[in-house]
């Protein structure tokens, strides 16, 4: 099987990155993680890049030429697929248009509900009965684009932001690899 050369974009903890790296080491998993881009030079996720010896690059997304730098890196590493994994920055139109249906994102809510930041706080405040996570294609809008996979759980009265995050991330670690398998199975 020819694996898709994939770049994972991160900003923080990197638990989804670590999970994708683990899956991608399986011969039958459709992607190989060839590059990791972080817009935070202190992102915990960078330690997984180092540990697994995957090329990584910190890009200061506040700088004017950052988009050009990203495009150049994607070209240099022959990247044909992009996974956003906690990348807290909107991807520029140029990158989105160049990778149509080839960039996916994971978000900790049942989209289209609760796009953006502080998801768990907002889920609790609005007394939702259920929540979960969504893997979706990336378009030019924030946390938008057609859905690939959703996973759901029901809230308990004792739930707080910490338990919601734990439960959601546990589901994310199943949802993201499943979404990738789903995408490539039908190609
Ligand atoms: C994940 O929960 C992901 O859904 C969320 O950031 C977290 C990153 O965790 N992404 C978004 O909110 C995107 N809008 P991780 O760094 O441990 O993978």
Image: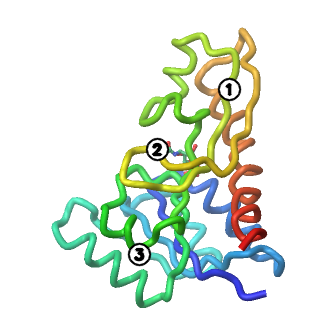
> N-terminal of the two: label 3 or label 2?
3
Q: Which residue is mark 1?
A: 163
For the residue labelled by badge 1, is the local secondary structure a helix, a strand or a loop? helix
Tell me the distance, in whole angstroms, between the alpha carbons under discs 3 and 2.
24 Å
Q: Residue at x 19, y 73 (%)?
A: 65
Residue 82 in the image, given as x and y percentages of width and height: 52, 69
Frontmost residue, 77 versus 53: 77
> N-terminal of the two: label 2 or label 1?
2
Q: Left or right of 61: which side holds 50? A: right
Tell me the distance, in whole angstroms, between the alpha carbons under discs 2 and 1.
23 Å
Position above or below: 9 against 128: below
- Neighbours of disc 1 within 10 Å: few (<14), some (14-19), many (20+): some
- Neighbours of disc 2 within 10 Å: few (<14), some (14-19), many (20+): many
Position above or below: 183 against 65: above
Residue 166 in the image, given as x and y percentages of width and height: 68, 35
> N-terminal of the two: label 3 or label 1?
3
Beta carbon at label 2 within 8 Å of ligand 1: yes
Q: Which residue is mark 3?
A: 57
Tell me the distance, in whole angstroms, between the alpha carbons under discs 3 and 1.
32 Å
Frontmost residue, 101 versus 126: 101
Q: Residue at x 52, y 34 (%)?
A: 112
| Quadrant into which the C terminus falls | bottom right
Q: Residue at x 26, y 77 (%)?
A: 68
For the residue labelled by badge 3, is the local secondary structure a helix, a strand or a loop? strand
Q: Which residue is mark 2?
A: 143
């Amino acid at each position: 099987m020819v694996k898709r050369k994939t770049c994972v974009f991160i900003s923080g903890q990197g638990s989804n990155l670590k999970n994708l790296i683990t899956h991608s080491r399986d011969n039958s998993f459709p992607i190989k993680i060839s590059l990791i881009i972080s817009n935070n030079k202190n992102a915990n996720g960078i330690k997984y890049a180092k540990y697994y010896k995957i090329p990584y690059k910190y890009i200061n997304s506040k700088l004017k030429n950052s988009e050009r730098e990203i495009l150049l890196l994607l070209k240099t590493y022959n990247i044909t697929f992009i996974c956003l994994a906690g990348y807290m920055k909107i991807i520029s139109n140029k990158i989105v248009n160049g990778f149509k249906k080839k960039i996916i994102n994971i978000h900790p809510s049942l989209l289209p509900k609760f796009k953006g930041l502080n998801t768990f706080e907002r889920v609790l405040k609005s007394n939702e009965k259920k929540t979960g996570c969504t893997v979706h294609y990336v378009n030019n809008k924030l946390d938008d684009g057609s859905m690939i996979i959703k996973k759901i759980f029901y809230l308990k009265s004792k739930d707080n932001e910490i338990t919601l995050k734990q439960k959601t991330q546990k589901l994310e670690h199943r949802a993201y690899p499943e979404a990738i398998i789903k995408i490539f199975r039908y190609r």
